[in-house]
Image (cartoon, helix red, strand yellow):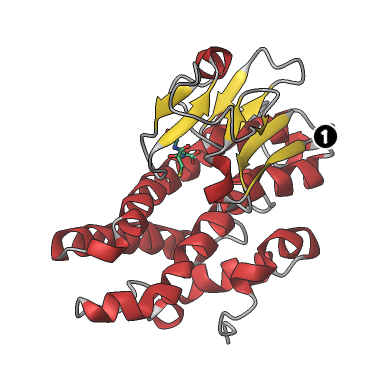
């Protein structure tokens, strides 16, 4: 599988971590977010020359979410990725596009020789329970995306929406951790991987504390350790496992310990 994205991207880490556990082969290509504006979005993604990256290019498209200005997407890219977003995964021959980071995560688990341990599809209820966590995480993640993108012009309404989504999601995670070692049972699954990457990314809001103070607010997760101790401990425990830490170090290394 090939993934094209801006890098680094916690949404891509989900698939990278799963691929390592599952023994799946993954090729990741991309560049830091501002540079991706000057790339051709395609299975064979590449950096465009200054002459190619102009508004008159046949590939020029108005950006839609999280980017500003023009992006360069081929017709084949939009056929494979109808919503035109990254991370964008492709089957190894480039014919099938897989979008939404949680679906890319599933594809990484499914394509590895040991992936069934992470996503046991032969067990309809256990795999569907894993899907339930992925769906709940997506709702939280979408709210977080809107919150982060609106950060310089944060309104009370947006802040309250984020706080409510955070409270709902973390409350559920903390609840399940009272009686379970992992989110969907006794073993690590892709539900845990998605949770760790989504929450670690969310906790980066602490780096926006000054911007939030300017509008009279504190980071939504300022008291996570006290409010959701089990969810927080699960995040820290898993993120310090070597396969996780390889990707997550930069976002979790300065988090206070769980104890
Ligand atoms: N929920 C999606 C979010 C993907 C997404 O919204 N990507 C944005 C960048 S953050 C994008 O590719 N925008 C392309 C555009 O603006 O046209 C996921 O987890 O993959």
Q: Please name whichever residue, 81 or 135, is drawn nearer the observer in this view of the structure.
A: 81
**Label 1 beta carbon less than 8 Å to ligand 1:** no
Q: Ligand 1: give its quadrant.
A: top left
Image quadrant assignment for residue 244: bottom right
Image location of residue 152, percent across then percent down: 28, 65
Res 184 seen here = no
Residue at 71% x, 70% y is 240
Q: From the image, tell me which residue sits under label 1.
A: 25
Which of the 4 image quadrants contains residue 104?
Answer: top right
Q: Secondary structure at mark 1?
A: loop
Could you say which is closer to the camera, residue 244 or residue 182? 244
The residue positioned 36% from the left and 45% from the top of the image is: 139
Q: Nearer the viewer, residue 32 or 256?
A: 32
> Compared with residue 68, is residue 77 higher up or lower down, i.e. above or below?
above
For the point 38% across and 81% down, which residue is it? 223
Q: Quadrant of residue 182?
A: bottom right
Nearest to the observer: residue 154 or residue 128: 154
- Name the quarter where the C terminus is drawn: bottom right
Where residue 6 appears, x then y in whole percent? 59, 45
- Residue sitting farthest toward the bottom: 259
242 left or right of 185?
A: right
Considering every residue shown, the one lying at the far front of the view is 51
Give coordinates of residue 254: x percent, y percent: 60, 81
Expressed as whole percent of the image width and height from the top left, the position of residue 24 reads 81, 35
Please say if 78 is above or below 22.
above
- The residue under the point 76% across, 62% down is 246
């Amino acid at each position: 599988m090939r993934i094209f994205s801006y890098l680094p991207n916690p949404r891509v880490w989900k698939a990278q971590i799963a691929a390592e556990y599952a023994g799946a082969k993954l090729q990741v290509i991309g560049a830091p977010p501002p540079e991706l504006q000057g790339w051709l979005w395609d299975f064979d993604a590449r950096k465009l020359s200054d002459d190619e990256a102009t508004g008159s290019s046949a590939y020029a498209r108005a950006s839609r979410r999280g980017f500003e200005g023009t992006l360069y997407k081929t017709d084949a890219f939009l056929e494979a990725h109808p919503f035109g977003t990254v991370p964008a995964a492709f089957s190894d021959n480039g014919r099938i596009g897989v979008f939404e980071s949680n679906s890319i995560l599933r594809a990484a688990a499914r394509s590895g020789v040991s992936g069934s341990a992470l996503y046991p599809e032969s067990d309809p209820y256990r795999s569907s329970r894993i899907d339930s966590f992925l769906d709940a995480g997506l709702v939280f993640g979408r709210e977080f995306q809107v919150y982060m993108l609106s950060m310089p012009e944060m309104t009370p309404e947006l802040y309250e929406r984020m706080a409510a989504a955070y409270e709902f999601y973390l409350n559920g995670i903390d609840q399940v951790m009272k009686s379970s070692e992992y989110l969907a049972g006794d073993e690590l699954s892709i539900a845990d991987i998605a949770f760790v990457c989504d929450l670690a990314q969310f906790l980066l809001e602490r780096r926006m504390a000054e911007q939030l103070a300017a509008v009279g607010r504190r980071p939504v997760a300022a008291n996570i350790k006290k409010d959701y101790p089990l969810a927080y401990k699960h995040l820290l425990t898993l993120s310090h496992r070597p396969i996780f830490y390889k990707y997550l170090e930069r976002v979790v290394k300065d988090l206070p310990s769980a104890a």
